[in-house]
Amino acid sequence: MAGTPLYTALKTHADLHRASFHTPGHKNSEMMRFFNFFGLDFTELPDTDSLYEASGAIKKAEDRVSGLYGTHQTLFSAGGCTLCIQTMIKLALPYGGKIVASRMIHKSAVNTMALLNADVRWVMPKVDEHSGLFLQVEPADIEAILAQEPGIACVYITSPDYFGHIADIAGISKVCKRHNIPLLVDNAHGAHLKFLPKDIHPITLGADMVADSAHKTLPVLTGGALLHIADVKFAPCARAAMSIFGSTSPSYPIMASLDVCQSWLCSNGKTAFFALQKEISKIKEIAAQKGILDDCANVDPVRLTLNVAKIGLSGDSAAKYFRQNGIEPELSTAERVVFIATPMNLPKDFEQLAMAIKNLQPSGDALPVRCPAFELPIVKKSLHSALFSPSERINSCDAVGRVSAGTVCPCPPGIPILVPGELITEISVKNLLRYGIFLIDVIK
């Protein structure tokens, strides 16, 4: 079809028939085609219900998901995990209130905190010197702030991270409950954790509100997400809070895919993820034999991260190799390649990936481990006032001493180099240049 650049690009990519080890979790599987979701593109009608005033079909579907995850209430989102994050922060954080947040955070959470004029107490994760990766924040890190700082409204963390590393949710939850403060978890990459042989979903482990990006690891159309509420006090205002940020025209095909997914999970979830974990375990064994498996004690067992720097390769060059071998990974960094597998992957996908890892050739000695040098920020202006201040774009090299007007985060979720209102230091500029960010918005 002429004159359709986006459609043509998508169709061209689909025609490559690469094994999909990236989001969305449905992998454009037979299940998606069978249900023909785009033949169900309707709107709010008397018999189709309305998301923000749900009392019929949508609420019945949400209630089934709530029962599946063991929550007090679960809401659908057709606006991705971003809408769920915005909603739960709005519910837990009064305007201008104090929040403790891990610096490992998604840009959408920072923007929401800025809109709500949040007073943020950042917890900077430590760096693992052996891997060069940031570790998850610990219960003691949270306790140290809550014990000294009065008036904290809530605690916010991201778990798992992009590499599958999972925080000690149970331990952090105990700290929060001791201080009578709700724990909010951005679980964008962990909607499936409920259905693994060992249930390690944040709701199960004691979180009060959790945002799941269902489309990342479950058979759901892109944009489909779930907001789980365990603490009853947040339920009455949840839909009203969501309506502040969400579109008044939520996609019914996306919501329908969430509904079909919950039915599939009820019938097949545990069995399917048990089988997936076995498949990934086999591939991890192959990667371990090659010396490139990037694993740790508390990691999502179905997330696969290869540290190709150990055999002299950059992540980008390895990703190119995998694409040449018919495999599309989720993410490549300077040292690593990340693969997202789901039960919708076909047996041939796993065979293809296993063979490609076996045939991956070293390129010399291990590359040196690069430990990022991040520092606790120097705040010059509140998030809110900085975000809405007049700004200008300048070269990053010229930015030392200026104040950031936006969030600069190399990988969502990751460790922001800067958020609005923070002083730009020499270390900030080094990090900007390291990640190829040569222009930055600063306050005039």
Image (tube, rainbow, N blue to C red):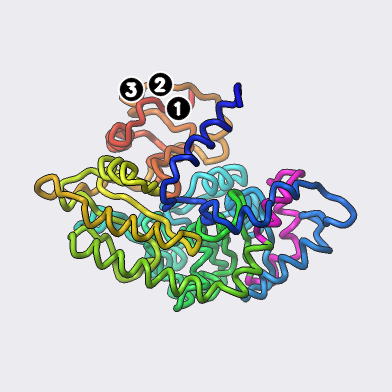
Report x, y in % for residue 241: 71, 53
Mark 1 is surrounded, within 10 Å at the Cα level, by few (under 14), some (14 to 19) or many (20 or more) other residues, namely many
* 55 on left or right of 290: right
Would residue 335 be seen by someone viewing this image from the given angle? yes
Reply yes or no: does residue 238 show up in magenta. yes
- Amino acid at the residue labelled 1: Val
Mark 1: secondary structure: strand
Q: Residue at x 26, y 55 (%)?
A: 357
Give yes or no for contact between labels 1 and 3 (Cβ–Cβ under 8 Å).
no
The secondary structure making up most of the magenta span is helix
- Amino acid at the residue labelled 3: Asp
Mark nearer the N terminus (1 vs 2): 2
Along the viewing direction, whichever of 286 and 212 lies nearer the viewer: 286
Between the residue at mark 1 and the residue at mark 2, the CA separation in whole angstroms equals 7 Å
Quadrant location of the N terminus in the rendered image: top right
- The residue singled out by tag 1 in the image is 442
Report x, y in % for residue 237: 74, 60
Q: What stretch is highlighted in magenta?
A: 230-258
Give yes or no for contact between labels 3 and 2 (Cβ–Cβ under 8 Å).
yes
Q: Residue at x 51, y 76 (%)?
A: 271
Between the residue at mark 3 and the residue at mark 2, the CA separation in whole angstroms equals 7 Å
Q: Which residue is drawn at 57% across and 67% down?
A: 182
The relative height of residue 382 versus residue 33 in the rendered view (above or below) is above
Would residue 175 be seen by someone viewing this image from the given angle? no
Give yes or no for contact between labels 1 and 2 (Cβ–Cβ under 8 Å).
yes
Label disc, if present, on residue 348 of the rendered structure? none
Reply yes or no: does residue 16 show up in magenta. no
- The residue singled out by tag 3 in the image is 398
* 224 on left or right of 303: right
- The residue singled out by tag 2 in the image is 394
Q: Which residue lies furthest to the right in this view?
A: 46
